Image (tube, rainbow, N blue to C red):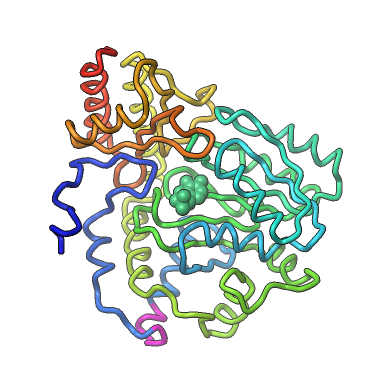
Amino acid sequence: MINTLKLDTLPIMTQCGGPNPIPERVLHAISKQTLYHYDPVFLEIYKDTTAKVQKLLRTENDVIMMHGEAVLGLEAAAASLVNPGDTCLNLVSGPFGQGYARHLKRTGGNVVEIVVPFNESVKAEQVEDMFRKNPDIRIVSMVHSETPAGTLNPVKEICEIAKKYGAVTVADAVSSAGGIDVQPDWGIDVCITSPQKCISGTPGTAIAAVSEDAWNKMKSNDTPLRGSILSMLDMKERWLEGGRFPYTPSVNQVYSINEAITVILEEGLDNVLNRHKRVAEYCRYQVKDLGLELWPASDDIIADCVTAITMPEGTNDAELRGIMRDRYKVMISGSHGDLSGKLIRIGHMGHTAYEAKVMIAVDALKSTLKDLGLL
Ligand SMILES: *Cc1c(COP(=O)(O)O)cnc(C)c1O
């Protein structure tokens, strides 16, 4: 089996934009026996898992898990919140923000946007300006850590403004939760994350913390979304209130999320966040020391979970990363969407956010650049 999957040709190191290698403990957890989803033991594990998510996000808002990849949660938030004709302000500073307009429009949202270059982040003043011009904005969607660009949007400041104008907010915190401080209590009405980035679990689940304002908005729509895999209300009404799952949860995935967050809480959330900050600074220092340029336009908008590096002159994404993987057994990321080929990224998320691991990745990058005659 392992041979047919070629797992024996794995790179020694993976320092990517996620998914990345995860702790052994989490791997063991996912391989525990699959329980019937109404077994009292499973129900206890499920509730304990959502309680742990609340600790991770420092919130008492309802937490739901939707059993599909992170994108399910992102799409579900738009499908559940948007009433046809609602004015939605979508903030775009990278590929994930750019893609979100599709979800808003599909449900009939009237989308207005603030778009900044993909090496910058949206400024709170721009959002305030937009509200002055369009006081009827009902929903604001934003990406916290725009992973393909390595940048961070000021979600706390943006949400303060949005709430002041009575809008409901959605934030994609997929790559920040568990590595960069993000709290629904800042005014994020639907805060979406997922285990496959800083939480260091396996891909396959969307996690959302949902506020009362968001539930009220969903219920007050002309045709509230129910009876759909995209329905957040189903999770609230059937599961949280009724104790019945709208569909079978991914049982083993729940074990692994529980274990992954336990690992974080045992280290201490503040310690984990500080470690990400420290390792990110270390990575930036090492990269600049090689004479390379960081992709983000300024240091104050850099996300601590991934270091984005402008593609050096004289090579390209496939060549550079190909040599790194084949010769030095280190896998790093390129980017995607409009940023494809423009930058490379060294991830330092959760279980991969350690100086020693980043040191090896930077060293492999250095050797690769030497091989290419660029150093
Ligand atoms: C990883 C990630 C997602 C999930 O998207 P995939 O491309 O399916 O991994 C969503 N938003 C952000 C910001 C992410 O980093």
> Residue at horizontal 35%, vertical 83%?
41
> Residue at horizontal 63%, vertical 43%?
156
Depth check: give the residue in front, 155 or 374.
374
Relative to 320, say whether 133 is above or below: below
Q: Where is residue 343 in the image (x, y as percent from the top left)?
A: 43, 28
Does 24 lie within the magenta span?
A: no
- Look at the image and give the residue range highlighted in magenta: 37-44
Judged left or right of residue 86, residue 96 is left
Judged left or right of residue 297, residue 270 is left
Q: Position of residue 177 (x, y in %)?
A: 47, 50
Q: Where is residue 318 in the image (x, y as percent from the top left)?
A: 33, 32
Q: Where is residue 284 in the image (x, y as percent from the top left)?
A: 38, 25
Query: For residue 274, what is the image quadrant?
Result: top left
Judged left or right of residue 47, residue 75 is right
Q: Can residue 174 be seen in this view?
A: no
Q: Can residue 123 be seen in this view?
A: yes
Depth check: give the residue in front, 248 or 257.
248
Depth check: give the residue in front, 144 or 231.
231
Query: For residue 234, what is the image quadrant?
Result: bottom right
